[in-house]
Every structure is written in structure tokens, then in C-alpha cells.
Amino acid sequence: MGFSEKVTSLRKQAGWSQEELAQRLDVSRQAVSKWESGQAMPDLDRVVRMSELFGVSTDSLLRDIPEPDRSVQEAARAVTMEEAQAFLSLKETMADRIAWAVFACVLAPIPLLMLSALAEAGGLSENVAGAVGIAVLLVLAAGAVAVFLSCGIASERYEYLEKEPIQAARTVIQMAREQQESSRERYGRWNVAGVSLCILAALPLLIAAMLSESAVAVIAALCVTLALAGFGTTFLIRAGIRWESLQKLLEEGDYSREAKRRRHGHGGISAAFWLVTVSIYLAYSFITGDWRRSWIVWPVAGVLYAALAAALSARRGR
């Protein structure tokens, strides 16, 4: 296969027109047409840039040697600047929506707790307190689930970024690097703020437990604890989603090609784990009616899931 045929084949595999390839190489469409028809050859700089864009060596472009079977190896999917910008814009919007939806989930038990405390103090019947509290909890949970589903549907077309090997254009990599560097300081600040709030969230509950024997005071402190933890979580989620979106484009960290291979197959285990967790939470809560304590299932599940993920990664890394 000659040079002209290789350029044509690689361009079509990437899904680009002659005009799109010309824009990436800063040449005219006519120049690309001449290369593909064999009427002209590009200079060395253009050859090097084409090798970077297509993810092949310059030797394989210039020399008439057998091409490696790209289907047997990892078939890297091309990512254009338009796709990258649309992806980052979507993630920017989703970061805030998901963060506040998680916040709503954390706050959902608070009305039930407060109404239960009011019922214990004699200011409200237990049936009314339970009914209103559970109704508010379900409404907040339903709203959060709606946000999660809508965000999941909107981002489906970009799932390949975290599951498949990609070949981003040089301009995409440069843009992602610049954004990563400019947001590094903010990423650090938000993580520090989020972790600090989550740690400090335990203080109101500890203080109430030490200074007061009133059940109402302890419940009020628990509500403050949940609010602080939820607020801290929003910082972590907003920072994490933005940072991970850049890592996906750069294939770094948890989204490197090696990490993608190791993570392959974890999806089914994760889904099963959280389905079992939800079942345990609902079964315990409805059977015992102890909604004030059943929330502890979630932090315990989070710790167990982290341990499970670490064990799976270690096993696959052997």
C-alpha cells in the first residue's frame, strides 16, 4: 500500500473528510486531494503531524511495509475538537446538577427526622409526622433520580471515552492540558473544602451527645451533620466530575488505557453491589420503621465498595 492509499484509508477510518483533515494540518483541501491521488507529497512536518493524528509511525506512512492489524490491536477511536468541546461543556453543566441532586439525597431524611422529633415532643402526631416526612423524602429522592437519569442519558454518547482507547487530535490534547493546568488550583481548593466539611460534619453530633441527653437535641445535631456532609460532598463531586472529564480526554489516571482494561467487567459487579445495598436499606427501614438510623447503611456501603474496588483492581493488576 502506497502513501496516498494509506492517507486515504487512515482518514476514512478516523471519519474525517478531506476538508477536516486539511484543517487539522493547516493546509488546503486541494493539497490533501493531491496527496491522496499521488500527485504530490507533503513536507516532513506534515508527515509527522499526520502520524500523530492517525496514531501511526512515520515509517508506516512513508515506507511500503505491511501495516499492523489495527483491528487485532486496540482500535483507537478518533476524538475531534468539536466532540471534545461538546463533551466538556456537557460535563460542566452536569457537574452542578449531579452535585445538587446528591445533596438532595443526603438532605432527604432530615424532614423525617425533624418531624419525628416534633412528634416525640408532643407537638405532632406520629402518623402525620411519618407520612409527611416519608412523602418529602420520596419527592426529593425522585427528583434526584430524575436528574441522574437525564444526565446519564445525555452522556451516553460519550461513554466510549471511559471504556475504549481513543486517539485525540493534537489540538484536543493541548486544549485539555491547558484547562487542566488552569483548574488545578481550584480542584485542590474544592477537594480540601469538601473533605474538611465531611470531617467536621461529625462535630455537631458529638457535641450534642456529650452535652445533652435530649433526643430532640441529638436529632437536630444529626440533621446539621447530614447538611454539612452533603454540602461537603457537593464540592467533591463538582471538582471530581470536571477533573475526570479532562483525564478522559488525556487518557490519564483512572482513564488510562491500562486502567480501562483492568476496569472492564467491573460494571456488573458495581450494579449488583448497589442493588443489594438498596434492597438492604429499604428492607431494614420498612421492617423496623427505624428510618432515623437506617441511613448508616450508606456510609458503610461506601467504605465496603471502596474496599471491593481496590481488591478487584489489585487482582486484575497481577
Image: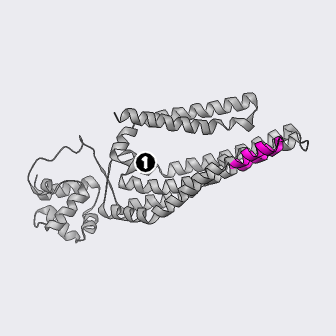
Q: Main secondary structure of the magenta part?
A: helix
Report the side of 126 relative to 42 (left or right): right
Could you tell me residue 224's position as x and y percent?
Answer: 73, 50
Residue named by callout 1: 159
Residue 210, magenta (yes or no): yes
Query: Which residue is at the front of the view, 176 or 2?
Result: 176
Residue at 27% x, 66% y: name it: 24
Could you tell me residue 211's position as x and y percent?
Answer: 80, 45
Residue at 76% x, 42% y: name it: 209
The span picked out in magenta is: 203-226
Whether residue 160 is visible to the viewer of this picture, yes or no, is no
Report the side of 215 relative to 106 (left or right): right
Query: Which residue is at the front of the view, 216 or 266?
Result: 216
Could you tell me residue 197's position as x and y percent?
Answer: 62, 53
Looking at the rendered structure, the number of numbered marks drawn on it comes to: 1
**Which quadrant is the C terminus positioned in?**
top left
Query: Which residue is at the front of the view, 100 or 202?
Result: 202
Residue 300 placement: quadrant = top right
In the image as oriented, which residue stretches furthest toward the right? 122
Residue 136, magenta (yes or no): no
Whether residue 263 is visible to the viewer of this picture, yes or no, is yes
In the image as oriented, which residue stretches furthest toward the front? 210
Task: Kindly state the secondary structure of the residue where label 1 is placed.
Answer: loop
Could you tell me residue 314's position as x and y percent?
Answer: 40, 35
Report the side of 55 relative to 180 (left or right): left
Callout 1: 10 Å neighbours few (<14), some, many (20+)? few
